[in-house]
Image (cartoon, grey):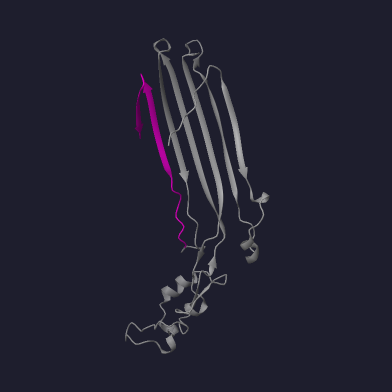
Amino acid sequence: MNAVVASGTAEYRGALYETFRNEALNANGYFNNARRVQRPRDRYNQFGGKVGGPVRIPKLYDGRNRSFFFVNYEGLRIANPAAPVSTLPDERFRAGDFSGSRIAVRDPLTQMAFPGNRIPANRIDPAARKILGLVPLPNTTGTADTANGRELNNYVNPQSVDEFIDNYTGRFDQVALEGRSRFFARVTHYNQGRPAAALMPGPLNNERGPETQVFLVCQSVRFDSHVICPV
């Protein structure tokens, strides 16, 4: 990928811009309407500004036609709608009732199958019972798994995932040797946070924290040669 970064000009110039999207302007999806789920947040805000011109220091230096600067900032704020689907145990499985499954559940002490493929209530570990209490119940009709006596994909977790990007770029240009050569340097700082959608709410979800990436790039060109030095 090749990227061209603007440079400053002989006059001071700048611009501001904004692009947005909002769920208030969207129609709800077919499957959301079927499940009676409201429109999730769906927002996109891309905004920024830039300014450039000659380098001038009052009473010290006038860089008109010789020294130029350019600075740009661009931000992105996104709320992405998501509806991950997962498989969660129903009330029968939570109570130890696996009678609808073809797979025998065996007693770890005797290696014999539990009668009726049901685990007695006093044999369910208290810690496991508390963990199951943190798992939500299925909220939609899934796909029948007759071999195991259960339903697959029986939980939908509609939500909105927030993402951000901050991008800063600065560039300096210098004309040298009476205009026969040009030197420029560029620095870019890129910061992004992109969390994952949670399969289910609560402390047992798979959601991870923001993934932040920072890049600093400097570049210079002198006498038709170039050096790129990532940091």
The one of 184 and 125 positioned closer to us in this rendering: 184
Q: Which stretch is magenta?
A: 205-231
The one of 5 and 230 positioned closer to us in this rendering: 5
Name the residue rendered at 43%, 12% in the picture.
179
Name the residue rendered at 67%, 50% in the picture.
24
Quadrant of the rendering where the N terminus is positioned: top left
**Does residue 186 lie above or below 139 as drawn?**
above
The one of 191 and 9 positioned closer to us in this rendering: 9
Residue 223 at what x, y percent from top left?
35, 18
Residue 186 at what x, y percent from top left?
42, 28
Residue 110, quarter of picture: bottom left
**Does residue 84 lie above or below 3 as drawn?**
below
Name the residue rendered at 53%, 36% in the picture.
74
In the rendered image, residue 213 lying in the magenta stretch gets the answer yes
Residue 96, quarter of picture: bottom left
Q: Residue furthest left?
A: 110
In the rendered image, residue 180 lying in the magenta stretch gets the answer no
